[in-house]
Structure formats: C-alpha cells, structure tokens
Image (cartoon, rainbow, N blue to C red):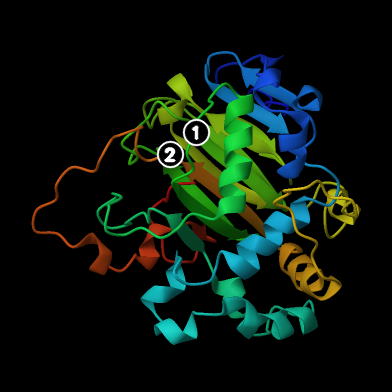
C-alpha cells in the first residue's frame, strides 16, 4: 500500500506501519469458513495521522474471491434488494439481471459499439437497511434480510480489527468501470459511528483518496487491488474519501492472477464459500475484465438502538436517484457522490 509520492504544494505522505490485529478474536477455522487466511498471516497496515484506518492486503484464500464476485453479480442483484436500474425499469425487468445478461456477457467481444447488458449498466445495489439517496437516511420500514454469508465475512474481519460483535446491517455495492469515479464524500448516515466501515474490493484496481475531517484537506492516495480490504474506524470513520480512477490490472493481464487460483475441493464444515461453476465464472470473468466491484458494509444501529420517529415521510416509497452515484467520464452528466 505505497502512499503517493509528494507533489509540489502537498504535504509529505504519511508513514506506513504494520497494524496489530486481534489474532485471538478469530479462530483459524472461522477465518477459513469465511474464505480467509488465518489472521496471523494477514498483512495489515496503518497510516500515521489516520488513527483507526487499517489496510489489509488481500487476506483471501486461493479461489475464494470468485465466490464474492459471483454473489455480487448473480445473487445480491436479485430482489428484494434494490439497485439503480429500479428507477428506470419495471420490477419484473430487474428481477433477474444475471439471467438477462449472462449470454450477452459471455459472447461479448472487445468492440465498444456492442450494446451493454443490464449487468454492465448496474451502478449500485443496497442490502439490509436500504440507503435512501434522496434523504441520505436509513429507515426501519425499508429493510430486507442481509445476506448471511456476507454478514459472516464482515463479522470475522471486524473482530480481527478489534470490533467483536459487529453486526452487518447495511451494505452498498458499487460497480465501477474504467470510466467510472466516485466523488469525495463522507459516510455519516449510520446512527452508530462507533462501529467500523468495512470496504472490500474485487477485480480491476483503483486509486483511493483518503482525506480529512474537512472536504478541502489534502488527501493521501493509495492503490486498491483485488482482494484488498479497508477498515475505517475511530477518528478515520468520518473522514472524506473518494475513488478518482479505476485502473487496469497492474500485472498486465486481463484479470489479476489471484483469480487463476483454484478453490480447494475440501471446504470446512459450515463454510459460506460455494464453488462456482465454470459457466458462471466465465460470465464473471468477462465482466471483471473492464470492471471493479466494491462492497461496503456498515452497522447502522448500536445494540438496542432504534430509528427516531419520522413524521410525514415514507422513505420506502421514494425511488433511489440515478444522480446519486459515481461519474462516468468527463462528458457524462455529473453525479452526486455516494457512500463507497
């Protein structure tokens, strides 16, 4: 996670140091069940001046990233989860984005003139407590079950970072392409800021900017590669951040080499990881050749906390706004930043 070299007029980049993890909080068996290496093998880093920020360099076991990519494209896109396409299309048209897109994706060539599949038009999906892009709030009456496999993964990562008892209550999945970016913003809509924000990246690489408590503070830049995890907690929980660029895999191949590794045929009892069929992976691999998927997981409410009473608003009936996501190249309509 090298910080960007200082430019003229910028402060010197912060020092990178190894972060101490809570190894005893996650058993090797539970880590394996979540598709992760034993915590003792994780490479975790912090940045001076950013207490509570932890960068974990790809701790996934061989082949396990494929599971999360498939879930983000095939399962988590299904109803009752909400996506940006719901604003423009009838519910029956967005009920099975995978089924409507897989053949077109599998056959897709390199021509930019080919029409995009629905999966390629996907920009975001919300899970659990569904974030309302217009009011910038969550509410009790707009909630669907949170995926159990993703909740288990999140609980293990949070526990390893010192946050035992973390409850994955809301997720925002962002789907990026090479012409996508995410404007500077801060994630403050959750009612409990004492719990961390977890961010998982898969596919192509990106530049991540970590700023300060004020929008105008100069940010620190770092690379995010496939499998990397970021944890924003404590002081760093409410820092401004952005994703200005998505970059091709620095290895020079269409996909990062971590996707070449096979999943073990001997998964532990209770594993949340599932084998992907060759047919399904062909679709995922084609999608990832020009895309990056980011999952951000949050705990919205503290233990025993409830949402405040809302008067005169029906947050569930308000459709998410297409203007609430990342920009796509300089000619496109400018969008408001989302939670990342």
Which residue bears the numbered disc 2?
299
**Residue 110: where, in percent of width, then height?**
78, 76
The residue at 79%/30% (across/down) is 38
**Residue 39: where, in percent of width, then height?**
75, 27
Marks 1/2: CA–CA distance: 7 Å
| Picture layout, residue 128 above or below residue 87 | above
The residue at 76%/64% (across/down) is 289
| Picture layout, residue 92 above or below residue 287 | below
Packing grade of label 2 (10 A; few <14, some 14-19, many >=20) is: many
| Picture layout, residue 98 above or below residue 166 | below
**Residue 178: where, in percent of width, then height?**
65, 59
Q: Residue 199 has which mark?
A: none
**Residue 157: where, in percent of width, then height?**
63, 33
Mark 1 element type: loop
The reply, left or right, for residue 37 in relation to residue 235 is right
Q: Does the image show residue 266?
A: yes
Mark 2 element type: loop
Packing grade of label 1 (10 A; few <14, some 14-19, many >=20) is: many
The quadrant of the picture occupied by the N terminus is: top right
Which residue bears the numbered disc 1?
166
Residue extending furthest toward the left: 312
Pick whichever, 141 or 336, lies toward us. 141
Disc 1 to disc 2: CB gap under 8 Å? yes
The residue at 59%/28% (across/down) is 159
Q: Nearer the viewer, mark 1 or mark 2?
A: 1
The residue at 77%/35% (across/down) is 29
Q: Does the image show residue 13?
A: no
The reply, left or right, for residue 307 in relation to residue 288 is left
The reply, left or right, for residue 71 in relation to residue 58 is left
């Amino acid at each position: 996670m090298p910080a960007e070299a200082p430019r003229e007029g910028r402060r010197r980049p912060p020092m990178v140091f190894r972060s101490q993890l809570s190894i005893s909080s996650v058993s090797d068996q539970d880590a394996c069940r979540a598709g992760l290496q034993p915590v003792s093998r994780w490479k975790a880093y912090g940045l001076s001046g950013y207490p509570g920020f932890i960068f974990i360099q790809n701790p996934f076991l061989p082949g396990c990233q494929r599971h999360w990519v498939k879930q983000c494209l095939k399962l988590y896109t299904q109803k009752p989860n909400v996506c940006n396409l719901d604003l423009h299309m009838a519910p029956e048209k967005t009920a099975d984005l995978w089924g409507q897109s897989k053949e077109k994706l599998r056959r897709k060539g390199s021509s930019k003139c080919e029409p995009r599949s629905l999966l390629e038009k996907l920009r975001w999906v919300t899970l659990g407590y569904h974030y309302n892009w217009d009011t910038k709030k969550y509410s009790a009456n707009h909630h669907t079950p949170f995926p159990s496999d993703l909740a288990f993964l999140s609980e293990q990562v949070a526990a390893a970072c010192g946050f035992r008892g973390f409850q994955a209550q809301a997720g925002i999945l962002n789907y990026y392409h090479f012409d996508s970016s995410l404007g500077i913003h801060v994630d403050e809509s959750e009612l409990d800021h004492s719990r961390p924000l977890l961010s998982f990246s898969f596919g192509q690489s990106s530049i991540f900017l970590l700023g300060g408590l004020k929008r105008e503070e100069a940010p620190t830049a770092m690379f995010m590669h496939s499998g990397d995890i970021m944890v924003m907690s404590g002081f760093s929980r409410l820092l401004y951040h952005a994703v200005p660029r998505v970059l091709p895999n620095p290895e020079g191949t269409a996909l990062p080499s971590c996707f070449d590794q096979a999943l073990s045929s001997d998964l532990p009892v209770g594993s949340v990881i599932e084998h992907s069929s060759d047919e399904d992976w062909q679709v995922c691999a084609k999608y990832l050749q020009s895309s990056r998927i980011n999952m951000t997981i949050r705990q919205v409410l503290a233990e025993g906390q409830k949402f405040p009473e809302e008067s005169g608003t029906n947050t569930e009936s308000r459709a998410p706004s297409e203007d609430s996501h990342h920009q796509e190249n300089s000619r496109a309509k400018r969008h408001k930043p989302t939670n990342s």
